[in-house]
Image (cartoon, rainbow, N blue to C red):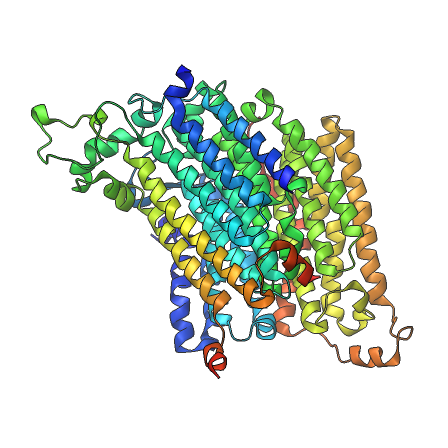
């Protein structure tokens, strides 16, 4: 398992590094990620959502549905812990 | 060499991610696997946040002056890209939730088998 | 009004009810079951309405919060999604009806949290299928996965370990998917599927795109349990509680196949996935290997549920191989097989759950004389088994027919051989159970064992009715397959 893990992770890492060759440089203000969708969030946040903090306006307004999903993930994890760890009367029995 | 200087963030995240990936596959102790999983997810967060960075004096994505007209018009290059940060807020929450469920399952197993070593649990099941 | 708002209602009804379930369970515990059934019934009605609208009026776009697509999140519902929505809501409704008695037997003190996670699981599946945004898909994928891990971990001896292994591999799969999203975002700046499809063709030579595509495919293959990456599936589905495995086993793998189709044919153009890269060739051989491996390992199993798990792995091979053949007929077969396979796997796991409920055991050797004791259950089982084998009036025949026709047209004889081999193995697998079940071997054991078994009678109605509905659906889909294909599937096949 150890050698297998080493081989798999080296192959995956080498492949990811191969992908970085064609990436835009780190911190380039004109990279595609910075000029396609996000400029609207920066320029229009005040006009469209009246929120100076752009992260807030994207989180709670433009992509608010993702945040609903995020909250549901937390709820899922909480219910999962209740389902898995709750022991009926377990505490009282353990004390005796 | 230029390649490394221009993109070292993207290379470092790969190394970090593969450390986590190796731990997830190869470690015998369940808690070590969970730690590996967390390193793995954190590396992805690092990658996304690196996308958001802009060189040349860009600041936090919060408007500093409210009257955004005339010569104070908002320059896109002045502010970091907010979208990857938003995505990563969600991804952080997801990774914490996964961590919680993983630890809950680990506790369940510890209660039953009194060990967290994978091979000992496998022996106990059979 | 309600028709306009039906697409989000499908998801939101289930999501909000999941949050309300603990409150209702706190008031009165036995209200949970009717509540879950009611909620899923409402959601099923909405999804049927949406399917009807899509068939008559074409693709539905719904903008979340009114923000236009590349900036906000949109729902895009075409024929493929609409079909998946009906399948998911319909089969989860059947499992919910069915779950009452088996839960009382298996998890009597944890029904409230079980039902909450049950609804969250359905929410996850629906959210994955309905969305038109790659990152939103990831969020709902995690909801579905997390609730799946928890539901599986509540099963019998060894279930937590199986769930833990599933959690580790499932997280790797989901993270690879997220990494693919990140790579695409980096070079295009967009997260919307339709927008990505517009922007990507200019970049098809880029190494970043190649890596992104590879990570998407590997991540999804982990989630769908394609053969060399299937290690988590048999243990997890065998040891899960019957109601959980009946919900997760038919849907999780098929939803993953849906994601694969979306990534290959909507986010990327078909000519990228088929002509530019040798992806379909790899998929074809992966599918063939999965069919052979699944079939052979299914033969080696003595546990009924575990055998079904390997049948599921072989069926994943059908669909992946069908897409790998890469002509319109075979992909039509693969999409039709998604539908059929949800129904068939659901039927198999429902029967397995009934047998586990009655026998407290899922070894095949325990099924003596079962046809006489539970005639209706086993009649339904017979229909499902015939469909898995691929006998004409049932639906399994037609998808297999298109798959074989497509691969003959492409000249892929290995895939034809694999499909026929799998049918042959399925005959042996199910005949073995029918043989054990039809004859009374009790005499050869001891009189005592026989007497103990004779207490077994027909399953309770709440379990029997869903099973019979599934058997009827298998025959109905088979009979009406032509109208299903002309109205739904033909539109879902990508234009090659």
| Residue C337 seen | yes
Of residue B110 and residue C15, the one placed in the foreground of this image is B110
- Does B121 sit above or below residue C218? below
Above or below, A53 against C149 in this view is above
Q: Residue at x 75, y 60 (%)?
A: C303
Quadrant in which residue C314 is drawn: top right
Count of labels in the image? 0
Query: Which residue is located at x 51 percent, y 63 percent?
Result: B107
**Residue C75: which quarter of the image?**
top left
Q: Is residue C485 left or right of residue C298?
A: left
Residue at point 70%, 73% (across, down): C358
Which residue is depicted at the point 31% across and 42% down? A63
Q: Is residue C488 visible?
A: no
For the residue pair C412 and C443, the one nearer the viewer reads as C443
Q: Position of residue A38 (x, y in %)?
A: 29, 31
**Quarter of the picture holding the C terminus of chain C:** top right
Above or below, C109 relative to A43:
below
Specify the farthest residue to the bottom: A96
Give residue B102's position: percent from left, percent from top. 50, 55
Image check: A36 left or right of B66? right
Residue C146 x/y as whole percent? 49, 54
Q: Nearer the viewer, residue C89 or B100?
A: B100
Q: Residue furthest right?
A: C444
Residue C244, position as x, y percentages in the image:
58, 61
The one nearer the camera, C457 or C180, is C180
* In the depicted structure, whether residue C415 falls above or below residue C316: above
Query: On the picture, is A83 further left or further right than C103?
Result: left
């Amino acid at each position: 398992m150890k050698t297998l893990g080493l081989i798999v992770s080296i192959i995956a890492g080498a492949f990811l590094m191969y992908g970085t060759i064609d990436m835009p440089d780190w911190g380039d203000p004109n990279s595609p990620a910075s000029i396609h969708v996000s400029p609207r969030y920066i320029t229009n946040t005040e006009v469209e959502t009246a929120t100076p903090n752009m992260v807030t306006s994207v989180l709670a307004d433009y992509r608010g549905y993702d945040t609903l999903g995020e909250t549901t993930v937390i709820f899922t994890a909480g219910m999962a812990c209740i389902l898995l760890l709750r022991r009926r009367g377990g505490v009282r029995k353990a004390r005796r | 060499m230029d390649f490394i200087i221009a993109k070292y963030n993207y290379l470092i995240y790969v190394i970090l991610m593969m450390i986590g990936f190796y731990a997830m596959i190869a470690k015998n102790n369940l808690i070590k696997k969970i730690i590996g999983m967390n390193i793995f997810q954190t590396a992805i967060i690092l990658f996304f946040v690196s996308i958001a960075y802009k060189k040349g004096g860009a600041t936090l994505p919060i408007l500093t002056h409210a009257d955004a007209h005339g010569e104070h018009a908002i320059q896109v290059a002045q502010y970091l890209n907010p979208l990857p940060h938003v995505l990563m807020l969600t991804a952080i929450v997801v990774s914490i939730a996964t961590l919680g469920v993983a630890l809950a399952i680990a506790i369940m197993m510890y209660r039953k088998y009194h060990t967290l070593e994978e091979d000992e649990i496998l022996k106990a099941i059979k | 009004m309600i028709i306009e708002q039906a697409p989000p209602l499908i998801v939101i009804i289930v999501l909000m009810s999941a949050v309300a379930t603990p409150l209702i369970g706190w008031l009165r515990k036995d209200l949970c079951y009717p509540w879950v059934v009611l909620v899923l019934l409402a959601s099923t009605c909405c999804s049927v309405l949406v399917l009807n609208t899509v068939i008559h009026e074409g693709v539905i776009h719904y903008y979340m919060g009114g923000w236009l697509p590349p900036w906000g999140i949109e729902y895009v519902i075409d024929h493929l999604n609409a079909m998946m929505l009906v399948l998911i809501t319909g089969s989860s409704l059947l499992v919910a009806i069915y779950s009452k008695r088996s839960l009382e037997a298996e998890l009597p003190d944890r029904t409230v949290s079980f039902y909450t996670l049950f609804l969250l699981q359905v929410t996850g599946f629906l959210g994955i299928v309905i969305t038109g945004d790659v990152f939103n898909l990831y969020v709902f994928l995690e909801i579905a996965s997390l609730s799946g891990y928890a539901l599986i971990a509540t099963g019998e001896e060894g279930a937590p370990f199986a769930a833990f292994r599933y959690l580790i591999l499932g997280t790797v799969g989901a993270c690879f998917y997220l990494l693919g999203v990140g790579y695409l975002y980096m070079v295009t700046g967009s997260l919307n599927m339709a927008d990505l499809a517009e922007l990507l063709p200019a970049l098809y030579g880029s190494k970043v795109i190649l890596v992104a595509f590879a990570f998407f495919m590997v991540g999804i293959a982990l989630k769908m349990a394609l053969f060399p990456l299937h290690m988590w599936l048999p243990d997890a589905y065998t040891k899960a509680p019957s109601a959980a495995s009946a919900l997760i086993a038919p849907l999780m793998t098929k939803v993953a196949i849906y994601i694969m189709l979306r990534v290959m044919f909507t986010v990327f153009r078909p000519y990228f996935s088929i002509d530019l890269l040798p992806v379909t060739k790899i998929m074809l051989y992966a599918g063939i290997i999965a069919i052979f491996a699944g079939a052979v390992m299914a033969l080696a199993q003595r546990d009924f549920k575990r055998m079904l798990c390997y049948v599921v792995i072989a069926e994943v091979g059908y669909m992946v191989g069908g897409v790998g053949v890469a002509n319109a007929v075979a992909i039509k077969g693969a999409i039709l097989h998604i539908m059929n396979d949800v129904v068939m796997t659901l039927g198999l796991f429902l029967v397995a759950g009934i047998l586990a409920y009655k026998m407290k055991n899922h070894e095949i050797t325990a099924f003596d004389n079962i046809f006489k004791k539970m005639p209706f259950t086993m009649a339904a089982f017979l229909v499902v088994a015939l469909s898995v084998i691929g006998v004409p009036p049932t639906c399994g025949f037609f998808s297999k027919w298109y798959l074989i026709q497509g691969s003959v047209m492409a000249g892929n004889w290995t895939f034809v051989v694999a499909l026929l081999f799998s049918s042959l193995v399925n005959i042996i697998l199910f005949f073995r159970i029918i043989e054990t079940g039809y004859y009374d071997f009790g005499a050869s054991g001891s009189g005592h064992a026989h007497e103990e078994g004779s207490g077994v009678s027909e399953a309770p109605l709440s379990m029997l009715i869903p099973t019979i509905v599934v058997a009827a659906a298998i025959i109905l889909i088979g009979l009406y397959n032509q109208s299903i294909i002309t109205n739904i599937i033909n539109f879902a096949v990508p234009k090659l």
